[in-house]
Image (cartoon, helix red, strand yellow):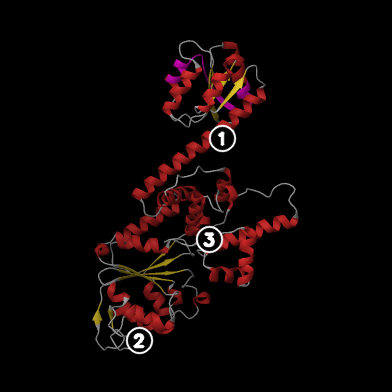
Amino acid sequence: MDTLSPVALIDDDKDLRRATAQTLELAGFTVSAYDGAKAALADLPADFAGPVVTDIRMPEIDGLQLFATLQGMDADLPVILMTGHGDIPMAVQAIQDGAYDFIAKPFAADRLVQSVRRASEKRRLVLENRMLRKAAEDAQENLPLIGQTPVMENLRNILRHIADTDVDVLVAGETGSGKEVVAQILHQWSHRRKGNFVALNCGALPETVIESELFGHEAGAFTGAQKRRTGRIEHASGGTLFLDEIESMPAATQVKMLRVLEMREITPLGTNEVRPVDLRVVAAAKIDLGDPSVRGDFREDLYYRLNVVTISIPPLRERRDDIPLLFSHFAARAAERFRREVPPLSPGVRQHLASHTWPGNVRELSHYAERVVLGVEGGGAAVVPAQPAGSTLPERLERYEAEIIRDTLSANDGDVRRTIEALGIPRKTFYDKLQRHGINRGGYISRK
């Protein structure tokens, strides 16, 4: 890790400067050595990638003056002061003012190397966080689908090409991968943007309700229909209708939906009046509707009618290079909403981002970022890269069980029913385990 880590060394004592530089180079650092503060300030960039090691007693500009100047350039730049015994009180004051460390002369080589190594890691994390925040800001301003991997670039290009057409689109992707985001982009990038974007989750409504929701009804069409209701399809006329989890649409409704797609007209419940509609349909499925073995009762003719253009959204595990950027974006958004500071990307959080499989995809990552910002469980302090040495088997199983519960809650937006179904445990057992592991379910509930 330290092979290419830069260090700036300032000391007016030629022999000591050479010996200190050699010590750091043998430890794997790249050393830029200067005989005074003026030379260092003229050469060091404001975003220098490593720590600065400087003597205090130097002519013209001493180490404390250099530290003050560097702090004005970048308050997060780690500065390590090398001090004689008589300078220790000044060094302690400098630490209180923000210096990273001081080392009293004469010092052991290992003491210096360890301090520089820690400072280098801190500097790397600071610069990485800055880069990610900047990239997230740029992405938020310019790209509604955040990601720099080739697969995301290709996805954005496809959306740009088809957005302003009236072609119906089928979006395929796992839960939480961003299917509704794609539908909203198609709407916003099209000439239909001034019309309504109307979304309906076909899996969230019972069969007795979905037809009324889609097609509307007249007063008295059925028991409880006291007044006329405009359906989602008619409300989307002039805009875009997004049908999520279309694989859950009841068979009888599929027949009527097929006619809507073919004729662009509806007949609300309780009337024989045929009403024309002008809309684009974007349907989303989390299964492969093109595979008869998994399509089940979904009508083949409806699939082919929707499948004019199919867009596949890759799961997060297949574009891992986008994870830090997405996390930074979601953390910044959460910090603004919760009026908190964006925490630094700790080693524990970095490990979790790199090793977790993200079964809940972008949605799960968004919720994780929120919990990190809030400082609740699931944040950096609760993430461990490996089992502690000496852990017993029961202790390891406890940690593993807690992690599975957290992952399943994330993948299901904190929904108890879906989570216990996925875990295959009774409701009482589920709540007992939440209490035993100290898991707060509220931190996983979707706020969208």
Q: Which residues are magenta?
A: 23-41
Question: Is 396 rendered above or below residue 14?
Answer: below
Evaluate if marks 3 and 2 touch, with contact meaning CB atoms under 8 Å apart.
no
The earlier-in-sequence mark between 2 and 1 is 1
Residue at 46% in and 64% down: 173
Measure how far apart labels 3 and 2 are at the Cα level. Answer: 38 Å
Question: Is 186 rendered above or below residue 339?
Answer: below
At which x and y percent is residue 108? 67, 21
On the rendered image, what quadrant is the N terminus found in? top right
Residue at 60% in and 31% down: 117
The kind of secondary structure element at disc 2 is loop
- The disc label shown at residue 224, or none: 2
The crowd level at tag 2 (other Cα within 10 Å; few <14, some 14-19, many 20+) is few
The residue at which mark 3 appears reads as 410
The earlier-in-sequence mark between 3 and 1 is 1
Give the mark toward the camera: 3 or 1. Answer: 3
The crowd level at tag 3 (other Cα within 10 Å; few <14, some 14-19, many 20+) is many
Residue at 48% in and 70% down: 288
The residue at which mark 1 appears reads as 121
Q: Amino acid at mark 3?
A: Ser
Measure how far apart labels 3 and 1 are at the Cα level. Answer: 31 Å
Residue 52 makes an appearance in the image: no
Of 349 and 308, which appears nearest the observer?
349
At which x and y percent is residue 55? 55, 17
Measure how far apart labels 2 and 1 are at the Cα level. Answer: 66 Å
Q: Amino acid at mark 1?
A: Glu
Q: Amino acid at mark 2?
A: Gly
- The disc label shown at residue 150, or none: none
The kind of secondary structure element at disc 3 is helix
